[in-house]
Image (spheres, rainbow, N blue to C red):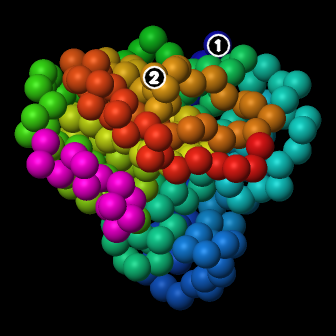
Amino acid sequence: MITNELFESAVAITREAGATIMGFYQGAFEVQEKSPSNPVTDADFAADQLLRTKLMALLPEAGWLSEETVDSPERLEKEYIWIVDPLDGTKEFVYGIPEFSVSVALVQNGLPILGIIYNPVTEELFTAQKGGGLYVNGQKQTASSRTKLEGAQVEASRSERKRGEFEPFEELVNLLTMGSIAYKLARTAAGLADATWSRGPKHEWDICAGVILVEEAGGRCVDLDNATFTFNKSFPKVNGIIADNGHLHDEVITTLAPHRHTARVDKKK
């Protein structure tokens, strides 16, 4: 059960992490490469430290899973777990593109019950609690009402477009390149896009908050096999993600199905 105090505190902490990131965004920061084309910066680590310290103080019995914290199997035994990406869209952050976000989710027994996604540049704050709907900067919002996929606005990753992963769909939909997957999910939830998908592996922290935002807005969020998500697994990766406004769901699934074999897969399990 989420209390109003816990919710409001989690929102304030997420905003504070965003302010920390902005301190680096407007100044100097060091960039390292975790792996090819996978940068990490001082801002990622600073935001992670703040979020972990303050969110764990809110709910000490919870587990913790974050992109920038060494994983621990202890989390698997917890009823509650914070699943966090302190800076989703680090490449956009590094290049000064304002399409990154802080993503915070609270999961209970595998299912998200709270989601917060915050873009500190645009100051867009997307929040949802289980059964409570989606709010953007305090105003209730829903997913778009579009019922035809042809001509729909679909948001796509820069790197995935460069790899040609969206070429089969370019004549069907109106593609808009957008950064952070968490931010794309939040924008789809809020009706700023009709759908988004990624046909490559995603970590739980990339998508967890976005999943509850989309679902609370009336949309659908599934993996590439049209299966719903559960979180806090020992191997915290999923085989891609499809998010839409709900009305387009069957058509999106049908459209993507013939291309399932071309999806990127993660060999490490």
Residue 65 is a magenta residue: no
Q: Quadrant of residue 179?
A: bottom left
Residue type at mark 2 is Asn
In the figure, is residue 140 to the left or right of 15?
left
Nearer the observer, 85 or 53: 85
Q: Nearer the viewer, mark 2 or mark 1?
A: 2
From this viewpoint, is residue 126 visible? no
Write down the residue under mark 2.
226
Whether 108 is drawn above or below 209: the answer is above
Q: Quadrant of residue 246?
A: top left
Q: Which mark is residue 1?
A: 1
In the figure, is residue 233 to the left or right of 224?
right
* Residue projecting furthest to the left: 151
Whether 204 is drawn above or below 40: the answer is above
Q: Which residues are magenta?
A: 160-172
Residue 163 is a magenta residue: yes
Q: Secondary structure at mark 2?
A: loop
Q: Horizontal and vertical percent for residue 249?
A: 29, 22
Q: Horizontal and vertical percent for residue 130?
A: 50, 16
- Quadrant, the C terminus: top right
